[in-house]
Amino acid sequence: MELIYYMHNRGVPRDALSPERLQFRDLTLVFGGELRYLIDNREILLRPGDAVYIREGEERARKALENCDYISFNFRPDERETLPELPVYIPDGMTNEIRLLLSACDEIRDRMTEDADRLALILECILRQIAVNLLPPNTCTRRSPCATSARRPSFPPPTARRCSGGRRGCPSWITRSTRR
């Protein structure tokens, strides 16, 4: 994966983005405030916890903003890379797992100079975790999405199964495996 751009905007006013056809993918996650996008002539309002996933070839525009805290990734997947298919609008897409991964991105950006490869790896984990979070309730995987991606290029993993825990992404397999 080639990371083209990463930014955590912590409430700094930004100008509008003029409509353009993307030559890359864009994942934006909102911590606070509101973002208003126009994607292929469809208006999307992002509120805290929401995300937008825009593929290459789609037209993107954004209204000017003030006091919005968000993180944005622009990237190109490798030809051999299989990323999960995600919807454009992901309401409540920022779970605690995603927040932790995003905080790692901030730490890496703040403390390291050669950070693009590390941020790209975390971005892949974020995309896969969002896909896991979108699975129907009572579905879980035997491995974390990042561990699965290291072994298999496909997603969702073939180990997805029904879970008696009753929660999305149920970590019951972790509890069982650590008791051995």
Image: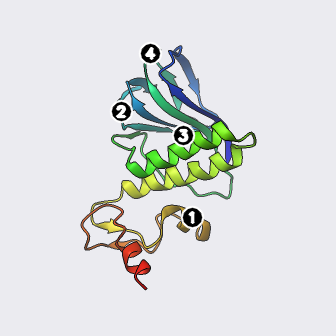
For disc 4, the marked residue is 66
Q: Closer to us: mark 1 or mark 4?
A: 4
Task: Residue at 33% x, 42% y: name it.
Answer: 92
Asked whether the viewer can see residue 167, the reply is yes
* Helix, strand or loop status at disc 4: loop
State left or right for residue 175 relative to residue 29. Answer: left
Q: Measure the alpha-carbon separation of dots 3 and 1.
A: 20 Å
Q: Residue at x 42, y 33 (%)?
A: 30
Q: Residue 52: where, in percent of width, then height?
A: 44, 37
Question: Sequence order check: which comes first, mark 4 or mark 2?
Answer: 2
* Image-quadrant location for residue 31: top left
Q: Mark 3 or mark 1, which is nearer to you?
A: 1
Is mark 1 in CB contact (under 8 Å) with mark 4?
no
Nearer-N-terminus badge (3/1)? 3
Secondary structure at numbered mark 2:
loop
The kind of residue on which mark 1 rests is Ser
Which residue is labeled 3 in the image?
Answer: 55
Q: Residues within 10 Å of mark 1 (few under 14, many from 20)?
A: many
Q: In the shown orientation, is residue 115 left or right of residue 169?
A: right
- Identify residue for label 2: 48
Q: Which x, y percent locates residue 170?
A: 33, 66
Q: Which mark is residue 149?
A: 1
Q: Quadrant of residue 135?
A: bottom left
Q: CA distance from mark 4 to mark 3?
A: 25 Å
Q: CA distance from mark 1 to mark 4?
A: 37 Å
